[in-house]
Amino acid sequence: MIDATPSREVADTVPDASGRVAPAVARLTPLGVAVLALLSEGDMHPYEMIRLMHLRRDDRLVTITNGTVYHTVARLERAGLIAEVGVDRNGNRPERTTYTQTDAGAAAVLEWVRRELPRVDHPVEFRVALAEAHGLDREEALALLHTRRTALAEAHAALVEGHRQARAKGVPEQYLLEIAREEALLQAELSWMDATLPRIADPDFAWGPDATPSERYLAQRKAARQ
């Protein structure tokens, strides 16, 4: 799981007049991206975000606690990536502040995905980037994933050769178990990419925002608001 310590969330600087978001992108964490991605679906308060992420099992990808989510929201607001749009109170419940994604926040998510999608050295970030890759144009996402596939193939080939040399030198297999596991994992990911990239390239493979929300999606949003 990720380290969601406050110092790593996002720089406390508002994007300048030119709209540059590079400093914020450089400090954005997977949880920050998850929050921004939720707000791309519509305005929400943090409690709804937390419930929706749990309903969708996003805790497979990032550590979700009330404290880390509320802290992340505050940091994103200070960075100008989200903005407060209202405060509501329902009965005896505490006030809930609703936030919206700013243009700078939308740009930051896409730039972060572009940065992390082709990388092979940030496995946690890659999983979140892959989950949000549909925000990119199909061709751009494919190009970035092909870059990742090339890097994975090179890493796999180097590992296979290193494993072979170690065995040739008589290194006992008990000391090579982790290498063998990593070799198998890389091969599995390469096989997955070889099966998945043609699917994404197929025009019949749905890509991009869905203009017609499914009943399941609407039911989740309703449940998260309660």
Image: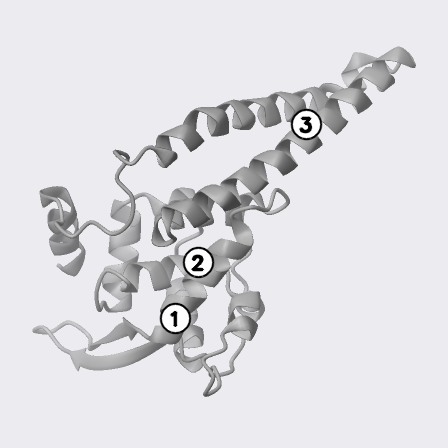
Q: Where, by quadrant of the figure, is residue 154 drawn?
A: top right
Distance in Å between CA atoms under marks 2 and 1: 14 Å
Residue picked out by circle 3: 156
| Residue drawn at (11%, 55%) of the image | 222
Dots 2, 1 in contact, CB < 8 A: no
| Residue drawn at (53%, 38%) of the image | 146
Percent x, y for residue 156? 68, 27
Percent x, y for residue 3? 55, 55
Depth check, front residue: 155 or 142: 142
Q: Is residue 66 left or right of residue 22?
A: left
Q: Compared with residue 188, is residue 212 higher up or lower down, i.e. above or below?
A: below
Depth check, front residue: 81 or 223: 81
**Which mark, by number, is residue 152?**
none
Percent x, y for residue 81? 39, 74
Q: Work out whether residue 2 can be spotted.
A: no
Q: Is residue 190 left or right of residue 136?
A: right
Quadrant of the snapshot with the C terminus: bottom left
| Residue drawn at (57%, 67%) of the image | 26
Depth check, front residue: 121 or 181: 121
Inspect the image, locate mark 2, and give the three-letter code of the amino acid beneath it: Leu
Inspect the image, locate mark 1, and give the three-letter code of the amino acid beneath it: Gly
Residue picked out by circle 1: 105
Dot 3, crowdedness within 10 Å: few (<14), some or many (≥20)? some
Most distant residue in the right direction: 169
Residue picked out by circle 2: 31
Distance in Å between CA atoms under marks 1 and 3: 36 Å
Depth check, front residue: 36 or 113: 113
Distance in Å between CA atoms under marks 2 and 3: 29 Å
Name the N-terminal-most of marks 2 and 1: 2
Name the N-terminal-most of marks 2 and 3: 2
